[in-house]
Image (cartoon, grey):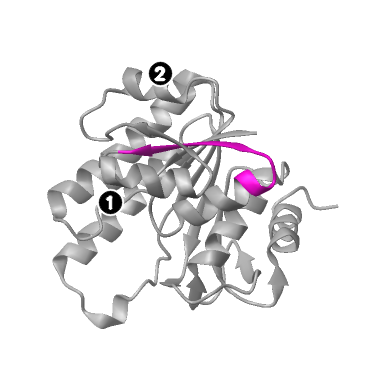
């Protein structure tokens, strides 16, 4: 599989690159900052310069050409509401349109758990982020892409166990970035997992089994 990653140098992105290339997939990692190229390269991916804000849909599609799937884990990361709108929101919309134009029909986005830190009173900037992420999810669900929306719990940098709890609705909790990357790796290769929103925390189920179980739970009932 040829995978195009947006946010490839990030906490989930570079972990996912390593997992995908280890199984033999080819990964192209898009970056805006030249300093990020080595992070992508060291994880096993091929860096390519791109900009969700500056590039047009046609320009992004040209970068995605020849790929089977797109993974979107980019974010503004607290750099202001305007950039949140342009990257987490409009950037996702542009990426989805570009993927469709390029024929990269499999599309996975790292979104946000609905309950994410809501009790902490993090302010209007955070509430804006949550609104933008929800609107971007809605946009993606209305495309013809073979999409998966992954909504992880509170992200942690501690080593992951490779075991998770995943489902269309689960209780909120923590999740290691390692485990998010491992689940996306499994989800990309679980063909029956399609056009579904998956909530994800650390848990007791191996990631490949968790992806298969979610796929089975959303299929036709017999």
Classed neighbour count for the residue bearing mark 1: other residues with Cα under 10 Å, few (<14), some (14–19), many (≥20): many
How far separated are the C-alphas under marks 1 and 2? 26 Å
> Which residue range is magenta in the image?
21-31
**Above or below for 185 versus 114:** above
Query: Tag 1's secondary structure?
Result: helix
Image coordinates of residue 33 in percent, x first then y, are 25, 42
**Above or below for 127 versus 186:** below
Q: Residue furthest right?
A: 222
Contact check, label 1 and label 2, Cβ < 8 Å: no
Residue occupying the point 74% across, 49% down = 219
> Mark number for residue 152?
none
Q: Which residue is mark 1?
A: 132
Residue 114 vs residue 22, the one in the foreground: 22
Classed neighbour count for the residue bearing mark 2: other residues with Cα under 10 Å, few (<14), some (14–19), many (≥20): some
Residue 180 vs residue 40, the one in the foreground: 40
Q: Is residue 46 left or right of residue 129?
A: right
Image coordinates of residue 137 in percent, x first then y, are 41, 47
Residue occupying the point 20% across, 30% down = 54
Image coordinates of residue 40 in percent, x first then y, are 43, 45
Residue 193 part of the magenta segment: no
Q: Is residue 201 at all visible to an observer of this figure? A: yes
**Above or below for 123 versus 14:** below
Mark closest to the chain's N terminus, 1 or 2: 2
Residue occupying the point 46% across, 25% down = 64
Residue 1 vs residue 97, the one in the foreground: 1
Q: Which residue is mark 2?
A: 62
Residue occupying the point 22% across, 64% down = 127
Image coordinates of residue 192 in percent, x first then y, are 73, 44
Query: Tag 2's secondary structure?
Result: helix
**Above or below for 35 versus 53:** below
């Amino acid at each position: 599989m040829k995978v195009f990653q947006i946010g490839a140098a990030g906490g989930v992105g570079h972990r996912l690159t390593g997992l995908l290339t280890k199984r033999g997939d080819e990964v192209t990692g898009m970056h805006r900052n030249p300093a990020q190229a080595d992070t992508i390269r060291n994880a096993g991916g091929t860096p390519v310069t791109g900009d969700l804000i500056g590039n047009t849909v046609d320009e992004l599609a040209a970068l995605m050409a020849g790929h089977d799937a797109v993974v979107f884990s980019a974010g503004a990361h607290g750099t202001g509401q305007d950039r949140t709108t342009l990257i987490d929101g409009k950037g996702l919309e542009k990426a989805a349109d570009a993927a469709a134009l390029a024929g990269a029909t499999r599309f996975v986005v790292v979104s946000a758990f609905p309950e994410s830190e809501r009790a902490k009173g993090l302010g209007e900037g955070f509430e804006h982020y949550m609104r933008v992420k929800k609107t971007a999810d809605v946009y993606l669900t209305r495309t013809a892409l073979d999409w998966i929306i992954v909504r992880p719990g509170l992200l942690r940098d501690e080593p992951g166990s490779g075991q998770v709890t995943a489902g269309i609705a689960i209780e909120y909790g923590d999740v290691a970035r390692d485990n998010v990357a491992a689940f996306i790796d499994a989800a990309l290769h679980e063909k029956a997992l399609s056009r579904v929103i998956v909530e994800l925390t650390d848990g007791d189920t191996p990631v490949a089994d968790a992806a298969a179980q979610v796929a089975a739970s959303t299929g036709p009932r017999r």
